[in-house]
Amino acid sequence: MKTLKILLFFIIIFPVMINALDKVPREIIVKTSQPLRTTGNYFGLQAFDDFLVEKQVKNVKRILPKSDNRYFVVSFKEELDWNEIKGMEFDGIEYIQRNYLNEMFIVPNDPEFQNQQLGMVNIPEAWNFTTGDMNIIIGLVDSGALLNHPDLVDNIMVNQFEVPDYLFSQVDNDANGRVSLNELIAYLAASNSDYNEDDEINYLDVIHENSPFTDNIDQDENGYIDDIVGWDFVDAPDLEDIALGDFRDPENDPTDENNHGTHVAGVMAAKGNNNEGISGVCWTANLLIMRAGFRTEGSSGGYLQDDDAAAAIIYAADMGADVINLSWGDVNFSQIIADACNYAYEKGSIIVVAAGNTGSNGVMYPARLSNTISVGSVDKYGEITSFSSYGPNLDLMAPGQFIISTYGLGNDLYKELSGTSVSAPFVTASVALLLSKEPQLNFEQVKARLNSTTFDLGDPGFDILYGNGLLNAYDMIVNSHNLEIGIDSPPENSGQTEDFDLIGTVKADNFWKYSVMYTTKDAPHPDLDWYNVSNHENLPVWYEEPVEHGVLATFNVSPYFPDDKYLIRIEMVTNSGVHYDYRTTVFIDQSPPVFIDSLAAPMKRYDAETPVYYIQAVYDEPVNLRIDCHIAGQVYPVYGAFLDSIQVVKLPENLPNGECSFELTATNVCGL
């Protein structure tokens, strides 16, 4: 199923959700173990193809237009029973997930500069060092953007490789070797080439099918034909009951239809010092536009589907985006979104994500991932806004209430909006400013620089309401202490059963010491709820030597250590007394799951008039379950839900008549 991510700026005026819809009906996302090409609606994997036939497959579509694609969206004629299929395993299939919906959260001469709250985070002071660099690419995965907005058109990225060679020199008026969107428009205007006949020559004419720039050839062989000014990834035909506008056909037109992406784009990269409207945080920018979100009935923001959003993130990384803004999210963990974020991380892209608009403890995904930077919201007084999500996974804060930015066209050019959606782009664009000065910095170094130079808010040091504090763009740029902190191993959310080493890096030019502690609390007290990983005392053990990709500490797991989820915190202190935290999560479990015999039961349901049989099995913790059905000398295996404590498993339909016995094998996250 295509999962919808909520565009994280629901305008803070009584936002309305889509009747609790959180996934695309009758769809699943599949990741294969190896790259393959489907034939019709078949994968060439016998067991999985049989499953598709049984469930009345309607269509199979690859998600990425790449030869090594392993991701597919599968749609069915009827709704699926997720409890039945979510834990199924097939040869050649790495995982199956729902297609979730993600909600959209939301000293120059520019007239509205004084109303932008940029001074709160020292943006004008940072401009004394840099206003950006056109070589730094800012990726926007959102609802697209209005590329002809007068405050954005100068900074829209043009895919240079999609401009036909024979036209390049004719279009490049300033002979700088780079074609701009304005130059493409000017070339068409010289011959009055208004291809869409709307009495205006703009980017829509540049990408029109009759334009000389759209030759229907994938010049750069990236799988996206004529992606001159970005791409529209939206492909949601199964949501026609609620979707509005352009929601069916992916194409080379990333036009924004609900203004969310346009507003986010303006915060990041509106042209500065042009005597027009506002100034973006990084107003010398190369803004790569990906449309993955669409309008829906009854929603003030909009939604993105998992497959579309993941494809857009991967596209941004492949196009060389240095930093990517995601102003959307979901309470559900999505493996395909996590895969896409990790792909971008491995390619060197830095991902900044809005924390969420729940107003409660619990940063949303993908902001909760350790390879992203999560951003909460404060008002103009530096107080956390009522809607901002918070928690131990929060990195830092930025302004997010009544933020004026680009919005529409005509008389609706600018508008004030609120939400963590408009907080994240403050940080994204500040990262772009930093990279314009120090392009060699990696994710860990950028994250450390951001979090170690904030204005401290709330309780001293890190706290769950404000994270590491409020963005300070000036200090981030000038305080180059080559600070880096991160964990290479164990992987986030992995399971551990015995002592394990924490491998990573803690270093800085002004390094003093670091400690490694843990907690099991969702809202830990900064002092009382943290324990040292080596001796489990409520006092830090300080290590006074920096480490680079080595053993930071050993987590001692005694035989009777409690099974639980553990949040691990590395705290580094510099010579100047600045504290910086890095956090990751592991599961420790030394005891196998306990089968609760009294709750086990056979179950019978009906599909029309046909009886269907299930086995219910309940354990004291989430497990993966396999049931071997022994009958007539044969074994028929079936699989239960992934990491669920309550398993309801459908028995095979091809069981012969006779007495049947069942062998249940359950394993927890640690493999016990």
Image: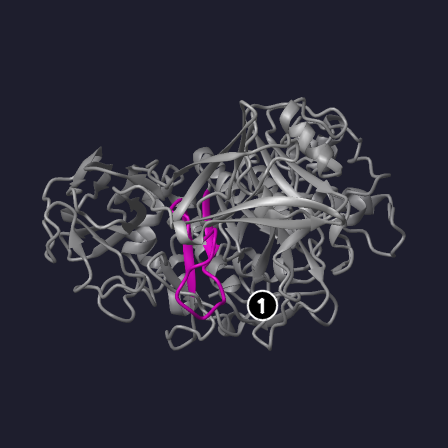
Q: Residue at x 64, y 43 (%)?
A: 28
Q: Residue at x 11, y 40 (%)?
A: 545
610 on left or right of 265: right
Q: How many marks?
A: 1
Q: Residue furthest right?
A: 197
Q: Quadrant of the C terminus?
A: top left
Q: Is residue 353 above or below residue 41?
A: below
What colour scheme does the image use?
Answer: one colour
Please tell me which residue lies in front, 29 or 318.
29
Q: Would you identify the image quadrant in which residue 466 lies?
A: bottom left
Q: Is residue 613 above or below residue 631?
A: below
225 on left or right of 540: right
Please tell me which residue lies in front, 557 or 535.
557
Q: Is residue 156 visible?
A: no
Helix, strand, or loop for circle 1?
Answer: loop
Question: Residue 34: percent from the left, percent from the top?
Answer: 56, 23
Please tell me which residue lies in front, 318 or 489.
489
Span shown in magenta: 350-376
Circle 1 residues within 10 Å: few <14, some 14–19, many ≥20: many
Question: Residue 253: percent from the left, percent from the top?
Answer: 74, 46
The amino acid type, in three-letter code, at marker 1 is Phe
Q: Residue at x 36, y 44 (%)?
A: 493
Q: Main secondary structure of the magenta part?
A: loop
Residue identifier under label 1: 10
Q: Residue at x 86, y 39 (%)?
A: 210
Q: Is residue 356 magenta?
A: yes
Q: Is residue 390 visible?
A: yes
Question: Residue 655: percent from the left, percent from the top?
Answer: 62, 32
Q: Residue furthest front?
A: 659
Question: Residue 39: percent from the left, percent from the top?
Answer: 74, 24
